[in-house]
Image (cartoon, rainbow, N blue to C red):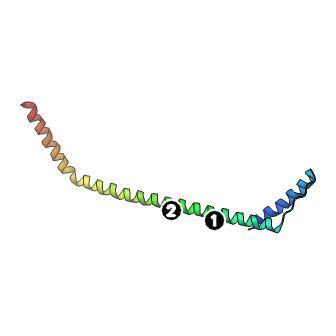
Amino acid sequence: FDVCVAIHYDVRGSTKRFYDELRRITYTTPTSYLELLTLFLSTLAEQRERITQQISRYHGGVDKLIKTNEVVDSMKAELTEMQPILAQAQKDTSKLLEDVARD
C-alpha cells in the first residue's frame, strides 16, 4: 500500500500546481484515499483472477501435450512391431504385381 500513499502525496502536489496555474481549489479527502484503496484492491483481484485463469489454461495445454506424446510413443512402438509384417506385405504385393504384369 506504499504505492497508494505515494499516489496520494503526488495528488497533493498536483493539486497545489493546479491551484498555482488555474487558481482553482481541489481537495484530497480521506474518502478519495479510501476510493483509491478500493480501486487498487479491485484491480488487484481482477489481475489475480486473470493470472489464475492463464495458469489453468497453460496447465491444460501441458496436459494435452503430455498425453499426445504418450500416444505418439505408443504409435511408434506399434509401428516398430509391425515393421517386419509390413516388409513381408510389401514383398508379397510386389510379387503379386509382377505376376499380374506377366499375365
Q: In this view, does 79 lie above or below 51?
A: above
**Residue found farthest to the left:** 103
Question: Of residues 48 and 97, which is closer to you in this image?
Answer: 48
Residue 22 in percent (x, y) is at 91, 51
Answer with left or right where residue 90 lies relative to residue 22.
left
Residue located at (11% from left, 38% from top): 96
Residue located at (37% from left, 56% from top): 68
Q: Quadrant of residue 11?
A: bottom right
Q: Look at mark 2 in the image and give the residue it sits on.
A: 56
The numbered mark, 1 or 2, whose residue comes first in the sequence reads 1
Residue located at (67% from left, 62% from top): 43
- Name which residue type carries label 2: Ser
Dot 1 falls on a residue whose secondary structure is: helix
Q: In which quarter of the image is residue 47?
A: bottom right
- Name which residue type carries label 1: Ala
State how far apart marks 1 and 2 are (Cα): 16 Å
Disc ID at residue 45 = 1
In the rendered image, the quadrant that contains the N terminus is bottom right
Mark 2, Cα crowd under 10 Å, few <14 / some 14-19 / many 20+, is: few
Residue 30 in percent (x, y) is at 82, 68
Q: In this view, does 49 lie above or below 96?
A: below
